[in-house]
Image (cartoon, helix red, strand yellow):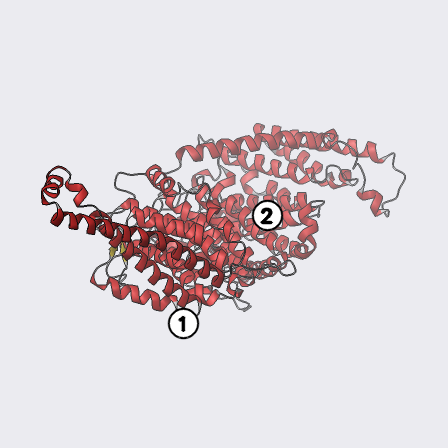
Amino acid sequence: MGFGGADGEELGSGGEDSDDDADDIASLDGAVSDDDGGSEGGADIIDDSADDADDDDAADANRAPKTRLRSEIAEHKAQLEALKDKDPVFYNFLLENDGDLLGFGNEDDDEDEDEDEEEEEAVADKDDLHKIMKGEKTLEEDEEEEEEDAANGPIELTNKMLSTWKTALIEQHSLRSAKKVVLAFRAVVSQGETESETAEVQTYVAGNEKLANNATVLALKYLGGVFDHHLPVKVNKGKTPLPSSAPKWKIVAPLVKSLLTNILRFLDQVSDEGMLRFVIRESEKLAVYFACVPKSSKDLLKVICVFWTSTTAETRITAFLTIRRLAIACPSPYLENAIKGAYQTYSAASRTTNLHTWSSIGFMANCFVELIGLDVAAGYRFGFVYLRTLANGLRNAITTKSKESFKQVYNWQYINALRLWTRVLTHFCEAGSTAESAGGKTLRPLLYPLTQVILGVARLKPSAKYLPLRFQCCRLLIDLCKKTKIFIPLASNLFELFDTAELRSHAKPSTLKPLNFVLTLKSPAQYLGTRTYQTGVVEEVVGLLMEYYDCYSLTIGFPELVVPAVVQFRRWIKKSKNVTANKVVGSLLESLEQNAKFIEGKRSAVDFAPKDEGKVAAFLKDVVETSAPLRRHAIAKRKLREQQLAEMQKEADRTAPAVTVLNGKDMAKKKKAGGNKGSKDSDSEDEVGGGFDMDDGDDDDESEEDEDEDELEMEDEDEDEEEEEMEEDD
């Protein structure tokens, strides 16, 4: 489980694994078949006064037989004492042969004394509970009294105590038992902290790991049902109010707040993956109560966002579901807090992009799209602010043209931010999709500024070294064209690459392996000017042009659209001496010419003019897509690319380092230590820039934070000189 025990060792890591914890959890849950067993019985409000009267009648009914039995036992003992005087010989005979008969009732007296003590304690507990429910006494005062009673020493937890509390929680929804469970859970949490971190006087103490685990499970799994019973809410006009609007909230609030606070403390200690998932999953069920306590909800959001990025896939999914549940429970303000927290977490995690983080960054982007779908209007507001922030960074780089301003744009954090908003808009603005009807009209105004920013980034620094970054931007624009059906003049940005020195000059032979353009922003110096790099650039340009023209392969104006491409490709084939590249270009040229003839044949039979927009838009809507030659070629290439990406992901999974779950304290230490390392540990092919300031403030003035120069370092002085020489050649 990963919290410290009384002996200083880490509970849950001393030779026992998560399977043992699961057995402990199963043993504790033996009386209940599922998670909801303790909450479904509390759907309705029960009259407390009626319950109290019934309990008193039942208690009186139980006392009557016991009283009669005690009187009969006393009468029988008196007869035995009289026998001692009347017939001493017979009495001595019984004493020698059947002493148990003469001692009849002694054990029962001891048992009765124990039962009387239990009854007295139960009556005292009940009286305290009545005072609490009537407002004559608060749970906090009751808790202080118990702490005073425990000043001489904490009470050691036992399985019998936990079982009794569990029964009371499930069957009676007892607040008194709930308070004891909260105190026990607080004691377990405190055992995992050092003496300097807590100076609380604990009412209970867990003697071993199993009891600590059982107390934790009991608190997280069943207290929610008790709270649901005492804090029922009614749906009003389709809206479900928070439990804080219930009449008994002031009475139960101290228990709720104490539980939530200790859950947050516990999350800072957990280092076992199974226990972490359990705590996060149960926290999701308590999301409505977190929403009632603003400070706890904000702290939970911060902690869960960390686990959303730094653990295994299953735990990341569980963490996101908790974030989403909190946003749904109270959209204002927690939906906006969730969107902002998720964006900042994504931005920080995307600083490092490589083979092992690629899939997790994509997963986070999908989660962010899901959050935007909860409130598209809020998504538009955040999109406007963050896109303006990105545009301000680009404007600063264009106007100042300094090395530092370029670094603020040419890094993975900035590119992944553009990729994130591209995914949001392609999802909600996809033509003909259900998502478009839900929020497409609201988010569609963001298409133009996003396109302008991406085009500006692609053309910011026209150097051969940064061709991979330009390809990243082109892929984003192609996705926008394909999903939203808007026209973006992208072809010219790719055609001009054929006239660069990198493709016109004679390439030198090389044995380097092909460069992975998917995971690269800046080409390594050893690739520049080589035949490997030249061939890779040509193949990438041809592939992007194929995807771009495929977006319009079934439009009526396709033959005129590809005329510049046909001229450019024929000119390239005549001048180029790279046989491999010429074959790739020739293949695309042939597909374009065939598709142009196909469209010309189809439109020769139409009977409408270009001004008939409706008929133009419906052109070839009833034709099978694969009938277009370019579409068939593009589908084949796309399958090959997807296969390569799948193999790349398999390789990433095979070589991925083991995931270590860090508690909150260890994460803070790692973050502090990592901030001083800079980019020395970064992959040589993956530029990890310090990133653009992602603050969403409304001030138009650019405000850039001072960051470590080593972290921002993207290239050394030798590479700068080489780049200047290549720009002069261009």
Please provide percent x and percent y for residue 18: 35, 39
Residue furthest toward the front?
A: 86
Which structural element holds mark 2?
A: helix
**Residue 15 in view in this figure:** yes
Q: Is residue 611 left or right of residue 135?
A: right
- Circle 1 sits on which residue? 136
Give 657 or 543, whichever is nearer the viewer: 657
State the residue lying farthest toward the right: 607
Give the percent coordinates (x, y) of residue 594.
74, 30
- Viewer-side residue, 58 vs 8: 58
Give, as a three-letter code, the residue at label 2: Arg
Is the residue 285 above or below the residue 589 in the image?
Answer: below
Q: Is residue 264 above or below residue 598?
A: below
Task: Assign a secondary structure to mark 1.
Answer: loop
Closer to us: 54 or 525:
54
**Which residue is label 2 attached to?**
423
Q: Position of residue 562 (x, y in %)?
A: 72, 39
Q: Nearer the viewer, residue 166 or 671?
A: 166
Q: Which mark is residue 520?
A: none
Q: Amino acid at mark 1?
A: Glu
